[in-house]
Structures are given as structure tokens and as C-alpha cells.
Amino acid sequence: MKQLAIALACICSFPSCSVFMAANKDGADVSQVQAASSRTQFLNLGAKVISSERLPSGELVETYQIPKERGSAARAVMHGLLDLSTFFIWEIVGTPIEGSLDKQEFITVKVTYTPDDIAKKAELL
């Protein structure tokens, strides 16, 4: 019985890791990418320049990889409810599950800018 109490105390001392992992909202979604209208806005979304080419007309064509948004409020709430209903034993299962779901995905977009760095055309690839 004493070992069970110690195990429960250890589990309760590390609560909510899966909740925080599920709630982490890094990256951008497609609507944010579509709303961007300047080079600065694309870079502020966390875009990594893959290729860049200046055309003779002065236009700039760049291809970006932008991290897709991760995290979900619904998943965070689910983990929180499961934590409470199982007295935080769910963390033993929930944290590895969230760790395996934490793979980074990217949105690839090719943008053509005017000489003033205003987006003229953006294509999702």
C-alpha cells in the first residue's frame, strides 16, 4: 500500500504534461498563409526560405516552408479531463501519445513579389 501511495505521489507531481503538449499552438494555418501580403508577413509566420530568385523584371520569387499549426484546444481539454478522472494516471499514456503526434509538418508556398516586396501571387505547393 505504501508503494502505491509513493507511485501516486510521483505521478501527481508531474501532472498535465500531455495537456500542455496538446495545447501548444506553434506554426501557422493555411488561412494565415493566404492572408499574408508582404515578405515580412511570410517571414513572421516562421517561414524558412527554400529558394530565392530575382527575375530580370525586378520581381522576386521565393519558395518557403512554413510550419503547420500544431496543437488543439479540444485535445488539451480531453487530456485534462482524463487526467482528473484517472487521478493523473492518464499522464503515463497521454504524454507518449502527444509526443508521437508532435511531428512537424510544413506548408510549402511559392510567392512572387513585386519589386516593392508586395506579394503578387502565392501558390500552395
Image (tube, grey):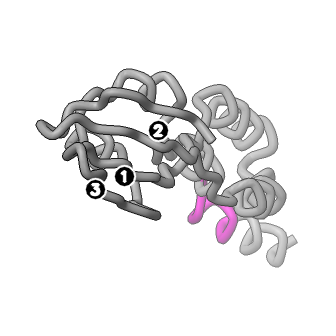
Magenta highlight on residue 2: no
Q: Which residues are magenta?
A: 9-16
Distance CA(mark 1)–CA(mark 2)? 8 Å
Q: Amino acid at mark 3?
A: Arg
Query: Label 2 neighbourhood size at 10 Å, few (<14), some (14-19), many (20+)?
Result: some
- Work out whether 116 lies above or below 94: above
Choose mark 3 or mark 2, whichever is in front. 3
Q: Position of residue 46 (x, y in %)?
A: 36, 52
Q: Position of residue 55 (x, y in %)?
A: 30, 51
- Work out whether 82 lies above or below 17: above
Distance CA(mark 1)–CA(mark 3)? 22 Å
Q: Tell me the residue that label 3 is attached to.
A: 54
Choose mark 1 or mark 3, whichever is in front. 3
- Residues tagged 1 and 2 counted as in contact (Cβ below 8 A): yes
Residue drawn at 48 percent across, 44 percent down: 110
| Mark with earlier residue (3, 2) | 2
Q: On the rendered image, what quadrant is the N terminus found in? A: bottom right
Distance CA(mark 3)–CA(mark 2)? 26 Å
Q: Secondary structure at mark 1?
A: loop
Q: Amino acid at mark 1?
A: Gly
Q: Tell me the residue that label 1 is attached to.
A: 46
